[in-house]
Image (tube, coloured by chain):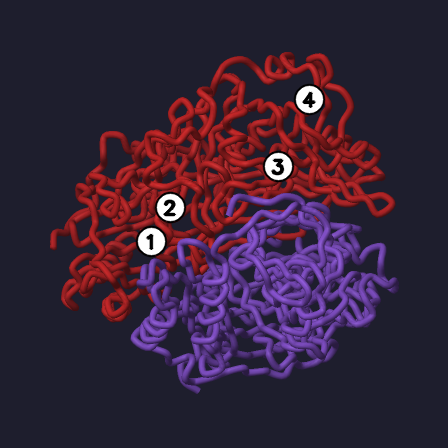
């Protein structure tokens, strides 16, 4: 086994001095770095001694802060630190994994021994040995670029922004709950493998959002800004929140929530549908991201998450959408929740085409599944929720590439249609074809102009037909990196943060509001 | 006791490091820990196999009307004190919260009894033992592909505070699930209990295989309103969303709950009783909430009538009632009904099917979500065994439906209740259990169909 120093810095990695507003990575790692490096190396050595044919170990320190206010009151102010490590091994052609919070080299040896025992047990119910495609043994340090470390911003400053927004919203008599939230996470990972990989990564995500809940006569309506489900998430520092102007948008958010109480139901029928960028994000996530995960395609997730309508024979031929639909998986996108230097089996971040001009051309792969289909290299999508989980194929940043024009241009070309904004609910079948989405708000379009608002807008579709009906994608001026922090998959259930760069898009002949 | 993740004395020792933390008026320490072995299989072989030990300690600091929580995965003095310092800084940075009721004391809310749903053999199951069960599942699936998971785990919980809380409880759990795929159709079966010896993997897979082998040649049926028999897994999913849509007092106080406008009114057929009841013999859980308040059985729908929400210490104070022991751990979310039980009837599943002239049998649902919380309107898909029922017999397999259906309307239209209660473990996390029977529902809305 090859191991050694972890100090090599890749040319593309962030300069150490830029991290954390001038603090060096070495300073940040001072408390844990040496111990974590020793831990993962001890784990690899122990796995080797027990007969593993491959091993990797990840030690993770995840710091997070979650702040939630309602009106002028702080409801939740939680800080957490999660420290632990996991060891993944191959023995007798099968996987074993074990994890612990006890950060001693003795425990590392015990956990590695357990992982090997688990692998040997797996081998008794294995039809074919696991094979991995090769990957260079990278040795590097990588960190999310940030301007302002969210953990260094005084709590008083955060509380002040949120309570001001909460108070503005709850000043409206119809707003029962005006909630404002901020979340920040810093995940430091120390990775080593029996192939000689040695990686250190620091990934920082920051989020903020507000939501106004209006209640009257048994009717409940909600409006969120900039996004629903605890707001907008992005890789970066506190500058992400500062760009949002949360309190400056509280008044409009509250007004729209109140207006929805008396708005008519969104009409049902076949119509032209324009989706805002946030809803396009969910559409891409559910109907493109998940169906193109190769483990789903192969049947490995059949029991829980489901499979996919996509088959291996469809690569290069399946008409997934119109010519305007081009989608990539890009782990290098600035600001993405799926942006990193290396995935959780040490594969370098990549950008790969999934759909090119409407045709399926790629799938999300791992070292194991790439070998299964005869690919030469994994495209680097194995990600684990914390130290305690086995990595799975997950979306990185699955982005719809921008087209042309503005949202106004998309609307101007519609004689009679609907605009829907901000995801509210989602559901899709186990092969990712039949879907239904709901949004917080809709506006009618008449002769190219926005009209009245509608409440409870929903639409349904079948994946390839829906993307085939896409006749416009707005241009770069409307394109934003967005993200969802709660993508669930796997057993035990893992929650992953994934990114989606999207702009508004238009779809013709869509079934709207048909579930009632 | 073998294999317990930590014991009561471990928790007391940990609490001593922060019990008198300087600057705090009160201190609370919640510890959760688990050891979980989970073996996943697909394509008739083991694909992932994990063993993990987890510990989480949550230190809550109260200073006057301010409070905050900090968590760590380490139980040593250094990390617990660091968490206490972090929580104190956060609490001091917060504005006063006039609704903060302080920490509960056992003198006021009572002392919880440990339920200790524990089985040594389950806690001691080895990777080889789990692999043996998987091999038996593969064998029982015959020529068909099978996918699923077999899990054995042990969990311990403690709540200690400067107000005198000193609670400890532990439980084990075993869960098996299997999806049999004939390539023409799929079928599903699952089972769970606190003890592995009560989990019948063979029967679960046999049910899955029978459904899969009966499912070839599925035909499309027009969407619309049908009489249905929902098997327990489908009922449990709907009940989970009924809980999520507002069985907690915080949601009721916010007006964002189906209970908000319906307390005291009939909402379901008179035979329907839905209660949060961790004491039910098939449920798996502990005897207190995450503030140490003893759990009580709370009927939320009592013989068809909506009754009260579950409460935690904070919302109980606002309502002027005694807390029912349902703090979720989040003030933002409030109390949560995590151990819901739907009362059983007197008929077998076959009896329920036998009473349907023309309808649909649903094995389970997939990817359900809330469309409208106040009306409990849900959407989702059927999967892994949807069949037409004609003249009391299961007939042709059906392509899957998307449904759009209110949970309360389903309970109101419940014509019969199955006698066999089945316990379901949560899909995410390890805390909670839903116990449900099969239901015959006279009117259920399928909105669209799909190609498989």
In the image, what residue occupies the spot 32% across and 55% down?
A59
Q: Which residue is mark 3?
A: A460
Calculate the distance from the C-alpha at mark 4 to the C-alpha at mark 1.
58 Å
Q: Is residue A333 above or below residue B193?
A: above
- Between residue B105 and residue B318, name the one nearer to us: B318
Q: Badge 3 local density, few (<14 within 10 Å), some, or many (20+)?
A: many
Where is residue A382 drawn, in percent x and y?
Answer: 33, 46
Name the colour assigned to chain B in the rendering. Answer: purple
Q: Is residue B256 above or below residue A17?
A: below
Q: Determine whether the residue tagged by mark 3 lies in a helix, strand or loop.
A: strand
Q: Is residue B86 left or right of residue B92?
A: left
Inter-mark Cα distance, 2 to 4 = 35 Å
Q: Sequence-wise, which precedes: disc 4 or disc 1?
A: 1
Provide the secondary structure element on which disc 4 rests: strand
> What residue would you read off at disc 4?
A417
C-alpha distance separating marks 2 and 1: 43 Å
Task: Tell me, yes or no, if residue B334 can be seen here.
Answer: no
Q: Given the current orientation, which residue lies at the most extreme bottom position?
A: B1
Residues packed near mark 4 inside 10 Å, few (<14), some (14 to 19) or many (20 plus): many
Residue that badge 1 annotates: A31
Q: How many marks?
A: 4
């Amino acid at each position: 086994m090859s191991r050694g120093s972890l100090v090599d810095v890749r040319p593309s990695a962030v300069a150490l001095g830029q991290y954390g507003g001038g603090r060096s990575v070495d300073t940040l790692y001072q408390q844990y770095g040496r111990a974590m490096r020793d831990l993962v190396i001890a784990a690899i050595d122990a796995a080797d001694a027990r007969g593993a044919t491959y091993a990797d170990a990840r030690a993770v320190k995840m710091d997070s802060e979650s702040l939630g206010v309602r009106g002028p009151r702080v409801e939740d102010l939680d800080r957490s630190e999660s420290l632990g490590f996991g060891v993944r091994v191959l023995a007798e052609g099968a996987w074993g994994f074990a994890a612990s919070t006890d950060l001693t080299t003795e425990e590392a040896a015990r956990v590695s021994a357990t992982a090997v025992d688990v692998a040997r047990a797996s081998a008794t119910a294995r039809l074919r040995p696991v094979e991995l495609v090769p990957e260079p043994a990278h040795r590097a340090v990588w960190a999310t670029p940030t301007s302002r470390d969210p953990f260094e911003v005084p709590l008083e400053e955060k509380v002040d922004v949120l309570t001001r927004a909460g108070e503005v919203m709850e000043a409206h008599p119809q707003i029962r709950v005006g909630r404002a939230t901020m979340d920040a996470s810093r995940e430091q990972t120390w990775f080593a493998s029996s192939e000689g990989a040695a990686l250190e990564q620091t990934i920082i995500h920051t989020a903020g959002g507000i939501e106004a809940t209006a209640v009257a006569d048994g009717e409940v309506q909600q409006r969120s800004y900039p996004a629903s489900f605890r707001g907008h998430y992005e890789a970066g520092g506190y500058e992400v929140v500062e760009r949002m102007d949360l309190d400056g948008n509280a008044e409009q958010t509250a007004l729209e929530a109140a207006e929805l109480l008396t708005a008519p139901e969104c009409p049902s029928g076949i119509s032209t549908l324009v989706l805002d960028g946030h809803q396009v994000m969910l559409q891409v996530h559910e109907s493109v991201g998940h169906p193109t995960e190769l483990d789903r395609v192969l049947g490995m997730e059949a029991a829980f998450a489901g499979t996919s309508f996509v088959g291996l024979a469809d690569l290069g031929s399946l008409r997934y959408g119109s010519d305007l639909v081009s989608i990539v998986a890009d782990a290098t996108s600035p600001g993405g929740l799926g942006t990193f230097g290396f995935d959780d089996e040490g594969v370098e971040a990549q950008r790969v085409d999934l759909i090119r001009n409407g045709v399926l051309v790629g799938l999300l792969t791992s070292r194991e599944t790439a070998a299964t289909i005869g690919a030469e290299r994994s495209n680097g999508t194995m990600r684990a929720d914390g130290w305690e989980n086995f990595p799975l194929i997950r979306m990185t940043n699955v982005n719809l590439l921008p087209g042309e024009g503005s949202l106004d241009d998309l609307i101007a070309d519609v004689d009679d249609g609907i605009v829907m904004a901000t995801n509210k609910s989602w559901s899709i079948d186990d092969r990712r074809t039949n879907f239904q989405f709901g949004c917080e708000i809709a506006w009618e379009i008449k002769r190219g102009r926005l009209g009245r608002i509608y409440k409870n807008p929903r639409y349904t579709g079948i994946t390839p037909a829906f993307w085939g009906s896409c006749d416009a994608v707005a241009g770069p001026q409307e394109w934003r990196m967005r993200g969802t922090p709660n993508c669930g998959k796997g057993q035990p259930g893992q929650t992953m943060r994934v990114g989606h760069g999207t702009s508004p898009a238009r779809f013709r002949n869509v079934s709207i509001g048909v579930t009632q | 006791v073998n294999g317990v993740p930590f014991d009561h004395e471990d928790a007391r020792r940990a609490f001593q490091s922060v019990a008198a933390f300087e600057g705090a008026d009160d201190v609370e320490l919640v510890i959760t820990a688990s050891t979980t072995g989970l073996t996943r299989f697909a394509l008739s072989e083991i694909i992932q196999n994990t063993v993990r030990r987890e510990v989480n300690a949550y230190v809550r600091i109260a200073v006057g009307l301010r409070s905050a929580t900090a968590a760590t995965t380490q139980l040593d003095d250094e990390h617990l004190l660091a968490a206490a310092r972090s929580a104190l800084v956060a609490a001091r940075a917060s504005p006063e919260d006039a609704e903060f009721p302080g920490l509960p004391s056992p003198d006021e809310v009572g002392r919880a009894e440990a339920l200790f749903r524990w089985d040594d053999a389950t806690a001691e199951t080895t990777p080889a033992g789990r692999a043996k069960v998987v091999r038996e599942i593969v064998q029982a699936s015959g020529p068909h592909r099978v996918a699923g998971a077999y899990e054995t785990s042990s969990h311990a919980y403690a709540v200690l505070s400067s107000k005198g809380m000193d609670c400890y409880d532990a439980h084990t759990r075993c869960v098996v699930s299997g999806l049999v795929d004939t390539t023409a159709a799929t079928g599903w079966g699952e089972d769970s209990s606190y003890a592995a010896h009560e989990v019948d993997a063979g029967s679960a897979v046999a049910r899955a295989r029978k459904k899969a082998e009966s499912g070839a040649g599925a035909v499309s049926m027009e969407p619309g309103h049908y009489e249905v028999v929902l098997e327990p897994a489908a009922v449990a999913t709907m009940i989970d969303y009924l809980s999520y849509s507002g069985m907690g007092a915080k949601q009721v106080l916010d007006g964002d709950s189906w209970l908000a406008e319906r307390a005291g009114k009939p909402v379901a057929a008179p035979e329907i009783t839905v209660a949060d009841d961790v004491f039910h013999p098939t449920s798996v859980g502990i005897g207190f909430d995450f503030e140490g308040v003893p759990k009580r059985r709370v009927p939320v729908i009592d013989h068809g009538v909506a009754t009260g929400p579950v409460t935690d210490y904070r919302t109980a104070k606002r309502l002027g009632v005694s807390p029912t022991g349902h703090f979720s751990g989040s003030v933002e979310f409030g109390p949560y009904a995590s151990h819901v039980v739907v009362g059983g009837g007197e008929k077998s599943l076959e009896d329920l099917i036998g009473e349907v002239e023309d309808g649909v049998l649903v094995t389970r649902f997939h990817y359900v979500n809330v469309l409208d919380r106040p009306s409990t309107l849900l959407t989702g898909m059927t999967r892994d065994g949807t069949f037409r029922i004609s003249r009391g017999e299961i007939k042709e397999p059906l392509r899957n439906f998307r449904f759009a259906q209110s949970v309360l309307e389903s309970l109101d239209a419940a014509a019969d209740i199955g006698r066999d209660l089945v316990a379901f473990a949560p899909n995410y996390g390890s805390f909670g259990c839903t116990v449900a029977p099969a239901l015959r529902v006279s009117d259920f809305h399928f909105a669209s169909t799909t190609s498989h």
